[in-house]
Amino acid sequence: MNCGIGASHPAEFQSPPRRSPNFLIFPGIPLQDIRLSTACYNRPVPAETQPEIHELLAVATDAGTRLDRFVAAHCPELSRSRVQELIDGGLVLVNGKPAKSSQKLHGGELIIARAHPRPATRAEAESISLDVLYEDDDVIAINKAAGMTVHAGAGNVSGTLVNALLGRGQALSQSGDPLRPGIVHRLDKETSGVILVAKNDAAHAKLGEAFRQRAIAKTYIALVQGILGEKSGRIELAIGRDPIHRTRMTTLRKSWHGADIANPREARTDWKALAKIDNTTLVEVQLHTGRTHQIRVHFSALKHPVVGDTLYGAASELRVGKLTLPPLKRNFLHAAKLGLAQPRTGAWIEVRAVLPVELCEYLKKLCDAAGEPQSGIDAALAGYL
């Protein structure tokens, strides 16, 4: 989609020189001889010697415990994901031999974990193909595929959208976090569709303010479990971090055991039913706020989780009558349309991303299993296919 962009380039919109983030390299240190004691213990080597070595002795009461859970329980400074990385990398030895996370302990084993420090996370240029939907001197809109993370983070440093942008030599704004150059909003890893990126700091500031003022129109297509009783609706439930399951967000309505959710923030989601297919509803969603996992959390709170979203209660496989559909392997959630004022000229730009092939194919399988014509779905999704 092409839109006319003014030819003037005010000084404040000039791209700043690209900065390279600093990083550290830690040399490996040979494993030292370690003496055993008669009790279970966790004794790290002093910090000046790297890697940090943890020496553990399983006792009789540890019998039946998985190795990964044992190490995580006795090394609280190591997260479960970090322990998994160490085991997968052969850096956790049981009686001198590498082992699997699922190995069950019997008691009496010596476990040695070598916790090499992670190199500082940084954005790295990678040659990754991108589907560019729109581009001008200030912004670029990408059709992000499901499965792609927007930017690097702990345990996830490659294959990101930022790395792909850097790989094409893209100038990006340098405002804020050096891991997130150009990023003014995000999409969840398993959500596909339009994501907007700023090429320079002035555009980043204008777009950031537009998002804060809710002046950017965001439209999603989602398939949710169950039949929504109304033709349209509004969900206004504050969202915060789940106090029990820290990888999830939740609403006050869904908080666990009476515990308060962390930093609840107002959130509004408007929806319109497009079609009903067996025991599912295809919806068009207007997002008025941009909270983490907002659409997924809001529909889960209504007991209508997004199809494929097992984190928020969706079935791993959808049943239609006596048939079970193959797993979708992603969330049925797609950022289909985004409207914004061009940050330099103010001209209104609307960018669309067609529904991905895997979601179209899933709808076809769903219609076939339910004995319903595909034509009705195609008509409901006019403009999104």
Image (cartoon, rainbow, N blue to C red):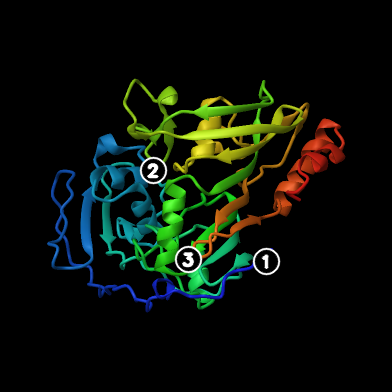
Q: Amino acid at mark 2?
A: Lys
Find disc 1 in the rendering and name its residue.
Answer: 2
Specify which label sits upstream in the sequence, 2 or 1. 1
Q: Nearer the viewer, residue 36 or 216?
A: 216
Number of the label disc, if any, that sits on residue 162:
3
Name the residue rendered at 14%, 58% in the picture: 35
Spot occupied by residue 250 in the image (x, y as percentages of width and height): 43, 32
In the image, 233: left or right of 57?
right
Q: Are marks 2 and 1 in contact (CB under 8 Å)?
A: no
Name the residue rendered at 45%, 70% in the picture: 172
Q: Is residue 197 visible?
A: yes
Up/down of 289 relative to 300, above or below: below
Question: Which quarter shows the N terminus?
Answer: bottom right
> Which is in the foreground here, disc 2 or disc 1?
1
* Number of other residues with Cα within 10 Å of mark 1, as a class: few under 14, some 14 to 19, many 20 or more: few
Specify which label sits upstream in the sequence, 2 or 3. 2
Q: CA distance from mark 2 to mark 1?
A: 60 Å
Specify which label sits upstream in the sequence, 3 or 1. 1
Find disc 2 in the rendering and name its residue.
Answer: 104
Q: Are marks 2 and 3 in contact (CB under 8 Å)?
A: no
